[in-house]
Amino acid sequence: MKIPLQLTFRNMDHSDAVEADVRSHAAKLEQLFPNIITSCRVMVERRHRHHQQGNLFHARVDITVRGRELVASRKPDQHQAHEEMHVAIRDAFAATKRQLRQFTHKLRHEVKSHQSPPHGRVISLMPMEDFGRIRTDDGREIYFHRNSVINGGFDRLEIGDQVRFNEGQGDVGPQATTVKVAGKHHILPDRP
């Protein structure tokens, strides 16, 4: 690692085998996430110092990345025994890897944004010809066919109804591929 690894043992003596295991896991993190980790601190702890058998181990990995701190910890509980120290270390580093993946996705702007479909108001209905038009918030007019209104609601539409729609390209311009009457949680502001 570029930044020296800090390893702490609690309630147990230093172990070269454990240190080698921790260094191996830390090196893999640095390979997967180069130039992002600025420090790495690991604590390995035996929960009960005086027991010879049935000891539970706790591992904690504290990583600093670009001014933020990510902490992954695997504490034993009644149902998940970490009687093997290397299993606790492996699990803590696996949790750290998941956190680093989430962090790098955010850095790359790969977090999904949930945009609501465009809104508009019905400005004309031609029931005999099976179509209507929507005026969008930015003043465009969008054609829609009877079949694009969800749940067969074309006959219940009225001029002025607020709708949400998905837009596609039709034969003569923009066309709503699906149209749904906006509910009370999607009320549009009145336009002057």
Image (cartoon, grey):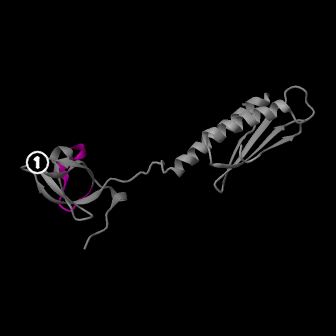
- To which residue does mark 1 refer? 130
* Residue closer to the observer: 35 or 103: 35
Can you say whether 1 is above or below 51 in the image? below
Is residue 116 visible from the viewing direction of this image? yes
- Please tell me whether mark 1 sits on a helix, a strand or a loop: loop
Q: Residue at x 62, y 48 (%)?
A: 35
Q: What count of labels does the image hold? A: 1
Q: Is residue 156 magenta?
A: yes
> Where's residue 77, x and y in %?
75, 35
In this view of the protein, which residue sits in the foreground, 185 or 47? 47
x, y (%) of residue 114?
Answer: 41, 51
In percent of width and height, residue 135 lies at: 21, 61
Q: In this view, which residue lies farthest toward the top?
A: 53
- The range drawn in magenta is 149-163
Residue 27 vs residue 117: left or right? Answer: right
Which of the pair 189/52 is nearer the observer? 52
Q: Nearer the viewer, residue 108 or 80?
A: 108
Q: Is residue 92 visible?
A: no
The residue at the point 61 percent across, 43 percent down is 33
* Quadrant for the N terminus in the image: top right
Q: Residue furthest front?
A: 2
